[in-house]
Amino acid sequence: QRRKLEGWVQVRFTISTAGSVKDASVIKSSDALFERNALQAVNKWKYQPQMQAGKPTETPGQQVVVRFKMKG
């Protein structure tokens, strides 16, 4: 933020049976400076787990792009 940089990070992860994120990894990014913060943020996210036959199941291969933008 001090450097007034903006960027993005594409992250791949699995949603666990408990709804938490696991195995998060960076696919690509606009700048490596953002990667650690993006992974930290994604690892805090919670989801409703996928259900199959009435039981929660892991959902691998999820992807998201985390964007870092300056306000204003």
Image (spheres, rainbow, N blue to C red):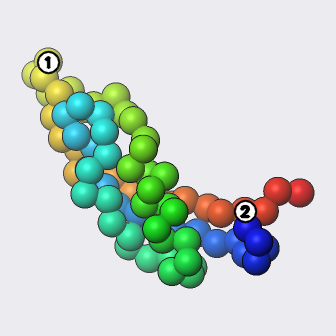
- Residue 8, given in percent of the width and then of the height, sits at 58, 69
Residue that protrudes farthest toward the top in the picture? 54
Q: Is residue 72 left or right of residue 30?
A: right
Q: Is residue 44 left or right of residue 7?
A: left
- For residue 14, the mark is none
Local SS, label 2: loop
Looking at the rendered image, the quarter that the C terminus falls into is bottom right
| Residue closer to the observer: 72 or 63 | 72
Residue at 25 percent across and 57 percent down: it is: 23
Q: Earlier in the sequence, mark 2 or mark 1?
A: 1
Give the amino acid type for the residue marked by disc 1 in the picture: Gly
> Label 1, on which residue?
54
In the rendered view, tell whether residue 55 sits above or below residue 71. above
Residue at 55 percent across and 71 percent down: it is: 34
Residue at 51 percent across and 80 percent down: it is: 32
Give the amino acid type for the residue marked by disc 2 in the picture: Lys
Q: Gap between marks 2 and 1, in whole Å?
A: 40 Å
| Residue closer to the observer: 34 or 64 | 34
Q: Residues within 10 Å of mark 1 (few under 14, many from 20)?
A: few
Looking at the rendered image, the quarter that the N terminus falls into is bottom right
Residue at 31 percent across and 39 percent down: it is: 20
Residue 61 visible? The answer is no
Local SS, label 1: loop
> Label 2, on which residue?
69
In the rendered view, tell whether residue 67 sits above or below residue 22. below
